[in-house]
Amino acid sequence: MKTTKINKLISTLNPMDYSTESDILEKHCVDWRGEYVGSSDLIIFPKNTKQISSILQFCHRENIQIVPQGGNTGLVGGGVPRKNHKEVIINLSRMNKIRKIDPIGNSITLESGCILDNVKNELIKYEFEFPLSMGSRGNCQIGGNLATNAGGVNVIKYGTIRQSVMGIEAVFASGKIYSSLKNIKKNNTGFDLKNLLIGSEGTLGIITAATIQLYPLPKEKIVIWVSFNIFSKVLDFYVYMNKKFKDLITSFEFMNKESIEVLEKHECKLNNLKRNQCYCLVELSNFNQIDNFSNFIASSIEPNMFENDEFIISKSEEENRKFWNYRESIPLAERKENFIIPHDVSIPLVNIDKFVNDTTKKIKLFSRSSKIINFGHLGDNNLHFNVLINDSEKKNKQSIKRSVNQIVFDYVSKYEGAISAEHGIGQLRIEELKKHKDYNEIETMKNIKKVFDPKNILNPGKIF
Ligand SMILES: Cc1cc2nc3c(=O)[nH]c(=O)nc-3n(C[C@H](O)[C@H](O)[C@H](O)COP(=O)(O)OP(=O)(O)OC[C@H]3O[C@@H](n4cnc5c(N)ncnc54)[C@H](O)[C@@H]3O)c2cc1C
């Protein structure tokens, strides 16, 4: 049943710009993993920044709470309304124009609703690389990427998206428009509001557009697939590759045996490849117009270096895609399991081996038949350390989750990591944030939130 306030808001909108239909609302109220199912009476699809400004002015006056939503691929329940709270969804998908490509300043200015993959493909025509890529690129949007400070598979080369953002346009809770789409790298004019908006998960403002730094499109990319019988060799390999190829490395991904098992169970087989304990996928990009790049890579590696391990250098774009498909299909395979407890953690590389060993041992003591599906962006210290719980142990899901989370996050603290590397806090990690982040830092964050959004209408119940 819609409230009078929501009906009043609807009366200000063009019927083409919103929906109250239950099947549309239902689709937008559930997150990608199907873990968070919220409710809402209204979803708005604004077309421009001015329209968002008038909607927020109205919502601010009438105390209507809203959720900004991009491609809804977030993994922490941040982009959907909460159960029984009926926030209005503001979905950015129609704000999908590229406003400008600047070939001199090497930048793009684009609206929040642009889908990441579309942007990347468009930029190929201009021989530019967009500095972000990840498995969800066919659905996630630039606004969502900025609001989550997305990481993905190229952080080792370009950093998280924050490192490439030059300017932002956003609408604050009051409806005021903040526009700083400056195509400049240096701007020391007081506090940097854009950096507060990046990673704020829709709690400080609705991001409507951004100017992002672009990079030269490499002439070609080569993927190396390696497997080892022991984790310590992965780290040795990482150090070795960094010394050899530092600036050419654009991805360094890790997968353990259980990740490949779940992949083979639900998605695809590793054709003709050795089954092993640990796997790495390394992408090298030819930025320097090196002739016969594949030969250059092969000849730079000492003979016999990997003679006891499987070591394959891709020979074609098709083979690159095949290896990437193995890595990127792991989250899709995991989704088909019944009970996975996900963790997206960051651990200093020097502690990763100890973290994995200690945490795995303790989890096995708690649940003997559990499996650790451990994969991720190793080059950025980022592991998706996901615990698969056996069917017979699923009686008390909530209590199992609490115990496993406690084990994992206590070791994250012990080994000086972060409880969320790239997915954010959303609804999923509110309790852990309270426990593992410094009290004063959280209080300062809350005070900042009050300045931006004194009535708490922007994505309430997320992060805090
Ligand atoms: C298969 C798969 C692989 C993934 N791989 C990675 C990965 O490698 N690295 C990584 O970082 N993430 C990854 N993710 C998570 C997800 O894709 C990212 O968090 C992405 O940046 C979210 O973008 P989105 O448009 O889907 O945002 P949504 O899910 O719609 O929203 C995410 C958050 O941003 C807020 N938001 C969305 N748009 C705006 C806006 N315009 N203004 C203000 N707030 C907004 C929402 O309120 C919410 O809090 C993956 C997800 C999947 C499903």
Image (tube, rainbow, N blue to C red):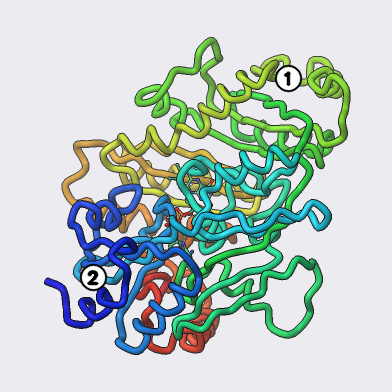
Instruction: Identify the mark at residue 86; answer none if there is no mark.
Output: 2
The C terminus: image quadrant: bottom left
Where is 424 relative to 204, above or below? above
Badge 2 amino acid: Lys
Q: Nearer the viewer, residue 128 or 319?
A: 128
Q: Earlier in the sequence, mark 1 or mark 2?
A: 2
Quadrant occupied by the N terminus: bottom left
Say left or right for 263 vs 247.
left
For label 1, the crowd category at 10 Å Cα-Cα, with few meaning under 14, some 14 to 19 and many 20 or more, is some
Q: Residue at x 59, y 61 (%)?
A: 416
| Residue 160, percent from left and from top | 64, 55
Tell me where residue 385 appears, x and y as whole percent.
Answer: 47, 45
Q: Judge: label 2 CB < 8 Å from ligand 1.
A: no
Say which mark, if any, is on residue 306.
1
Report x, y in % for residue 383: 54, 46
Q: Nearer the viewer, residue 11 or 20?
A: 11
Q: Residue at x 56, y 43 (%)?
A: 118
Q: Residue furthest top?
A: 272
The residue shown at (50%, 71%) is 49
Using the image, determine if residue 260 lies above or below residue 235.
above
Q: Which mark is residue 232?
A: none
Of tags 1 and 2, the one toward the viewer is 2
Under circle 1, the secondary element is: loop
Residue 428 visible, this angle: no
Crowd class of label 2 (few under 14; some 14 to 19; many from 20; radius 10 Å): many
